[in-house]
Image (cartoon, coloured by chain):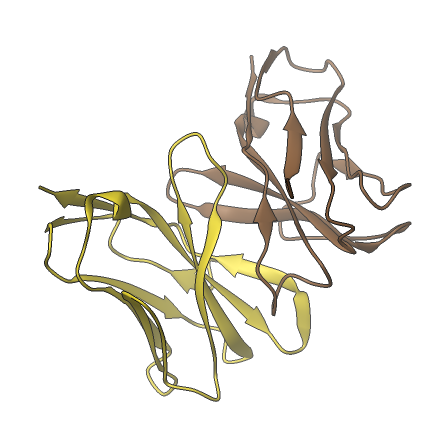
Chain colours: A yellow, B brown
């Protein structure tokens, strides 16, 4: 049973607008969350992370929000650019075993010119 | 250049024929891991290694073996491949562990088992 869920397989957004990617988790032991970005024919690359002691982390155009009570996090990309077209994976780690990382199924983002 | 190198990029084989996918990193990382990516399931962890001679099962270890005899190498072995192991495989490494540090991924190995 997947403990990290990305319920939107795809997202299409116009260039310059905001992209919002959502991620839900079921394991209450998760306390660290990461987003990875993947282009075709390449491996995933780290994008941004957030610890459960925070509710927001920002890095340039990318902001991740964490709502612990709802077991929900979201990634905002503002403004969206054509180079942001990729698959985005949400991942989570638990303090009890941080050698293991659980990934969601991914959301494919397409930025339209 | 810091990188994780997997070989081969593409592999087509037949059921039951043993194969090895190699993985090597040049960053002196302690931690290495294997994942498989399947449509609708995302990345699932197969095995991981915290250091030389220390390995442990991930979420989907059945049908796979690994070894970590040297720090830089972490091969994935399929002793008797089956069609349900057709997948896109990624090797990854980080300096200490996966949960709190960013992983560096290889470019992937697309495996087809006929």
Instruction: Return the residue nearer the eye: A61 or B67.
Output: A61
- Judge left or right: residue B110 versus residue B5: left
Tag count in the figure?
0
In the rendered image, residue B102, in percent from the top left (x then y), is placed at 57, 60
- Judge left or right: residue B47 versus residue B44: right
In the rendered image, residue B70, in percent from the top left (x then y), is placed at 89, 42
Residue that appears at 71% across and 15% down: B16
Using the image, determine if residue A78 lies above or below residue B27: below
- Judge left or right: residue B56 versus residue A57: right
- Judge left or right: residue A31 versus residue B20: left
Using the image, determine if residue A96 lies above or below residue A62: below
Task: Classify residue B11 by image quadrant.
Answer: top right
Instruction: Return the residue nearer the eye: B67 or A28.
Output: B67
Task: Classify residue B10 by image quadrant.
Answer: top right
Residue that appears at 72% across and 49% down: B32
In the rendered image, residue A113, in percent from the top left (x then y), is placed at 8, 41
Kindly give the residue lying farthest to the front in the view shown: B1
Residue that appears at 75% across and 53% down: B29
Instruction: Return the residue nearer the eye: B67 or B32.
Output: B32
Task: Classify residue A55 by image quadrant.
Answer: bottom left
Residue that appears at 89% across and 50% down: B52
In the rendered image, residue A67, in percent from the top left (x then y), is placed at 34, 83
């Amino acid at each position: 049973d997947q403990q990290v869920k990305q319920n939107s397989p795809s997202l299409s957004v116009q260039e310059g607008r905001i992209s919002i990617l959502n991620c839900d988790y079921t394991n209450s032991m998760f306390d660290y969350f990461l987003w990875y970005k993947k282009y075709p024919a390449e491996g995933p690359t780290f994008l941004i992370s957030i610890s459960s002691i925070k509710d927001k982390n920002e890095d340039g155009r990318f902001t991740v929000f964490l709502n612990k009570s709802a077991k929900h996090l979201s990634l905002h990309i503002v403004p969206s650019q054509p180079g942001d077209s990729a698959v985005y994976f949400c991942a989570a780690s638990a303090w009890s075993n941080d050698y293991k990382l659980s990934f969601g199924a991914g959301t494919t983002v397409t930025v339209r010119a | 250049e810091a990188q994780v190198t997997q070989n081969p990029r593409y592999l087509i084989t037949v059921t039951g024929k043993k194969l090895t996918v190699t993985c090597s990193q040049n960053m002196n990382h302690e931690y290495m891991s294997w994942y498989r990516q399947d449509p609708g399931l995302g990345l699932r962890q197969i095995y991981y290694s915290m250091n030389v001679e220390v390995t442990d099962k991930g979420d989907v270890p059945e049908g796979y073996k690994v070894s970590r005899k040297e720090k830089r190498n972490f091969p994935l072995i399929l002793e008797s491949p089956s069609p349900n192991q057709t997948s896109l495989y990624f090797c990854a490494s980080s300096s200490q562990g996966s949960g709190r540090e960013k992983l560096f991924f290889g470019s992937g190995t697309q495996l087809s088992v006929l």
